[in-house]
Amino acid sequence: MQDRRKRLMAERVVRDLEEAFPPLEPGRQKYVVESDKYAFYLYDSRPKDDGDWTKTPVAKVSFIDGDHLWQLSWMPPQGRWQKYGRYYDVETVILIIKRDPVGCFLGENSPLSYIKYDEKPDAKPDAETDAKPDSKIDAKDEN
């Protein structure tokens, strides 16, 4: 009975995360939810040039049996999961990830911030910078 309860809870968490994070740009970006025996992982996935998809970690959610709490973790650029907080339900965890008050999951402190700046737009020449300065100074202008 305990295994069935855990399996149903796992299916619900995966479904809730998938519903809460639909793709922003279908074909160019999607969220992937994976789980193992201990935790649920939310990844941002984008296509590479060769057709494969990259996965960038967004959040890790795990259930603490002894405390009956959900632990939320984030991945800093150093590449090791860091604890963010413990919450009573998955809905609160999803709300924290979406609002991202500190920018750890989808904001400027997340690994996604590096992806956002990979594609640099072509710089257009500015008319002021392209104009050659006139080295001659009229005596009339100085007075």
Image (cartoon, rainbow, N blue to C red):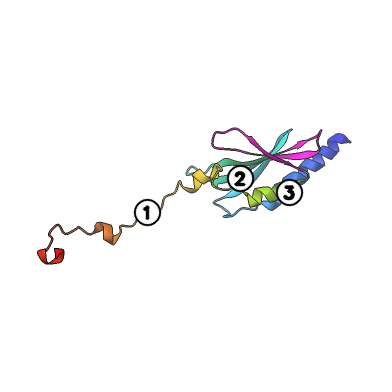
Q: Is residue 97 visible?
A: yes
- Secondary structure of the residue carrying tag 1 is loop
Q: Is residue 85 magenta?
A: yes
Q: Earlier in the sequence, mark 2 or mark 1?
A: 2
Amino acid carrying label 2: it is: Phe
| N-term-proximal mark, 1 vs 3 | 3
Q: Which residue is mark 1?
A: 122
Task: Please state the horizontal and vertical placement of residue 31, each as a whole percent of the image.
Answer: 62, 47
Q: Secondary structure at mark 2?
A: loop
Label 2, label 1: how far apart the Cα atoms are = 29 Å
Residue 56 placement (x, y as % from top left)? 57, 41
* Quadrant occupied by the C terminus: bottom left
Region of the chain picked out in magenta, as a range: 62-87
Decide: marks 2, 3 in contact (CB < 8 A)?
no
Category of crowding for the residue at label 1, using alpha-carbon neighbours closer than 10 angstroms: few (below 14), some (14–19), many (at least 20): few
Q: Nearer the viewer, residue 99 or 7?
A: 99
In the rendering, which numbered label is found on residue 105? 2
The residue located at (27%, 60%) in the rendering is 128
Identity of the residue furthest to the front in this view: 143
* Residue at which label 3 appears: 92
Q: Quadrant for residue 55, please give it.
A: top right
Quadrant holding the N terminus: top right
Q: Is residue 23 magenta?
A: no
Q: Give the secondary structure at mark 3.
A: helix
Amino acid at dot 1:
Asp
Expressed as whole percent of the image width and height from the top left, the position of residue 30 reads 60, 49
Q: Give the class, few, some or many, for how many residues have Cα within 10 Å of label 3's Cα (few <14, many ≥20).
A: few
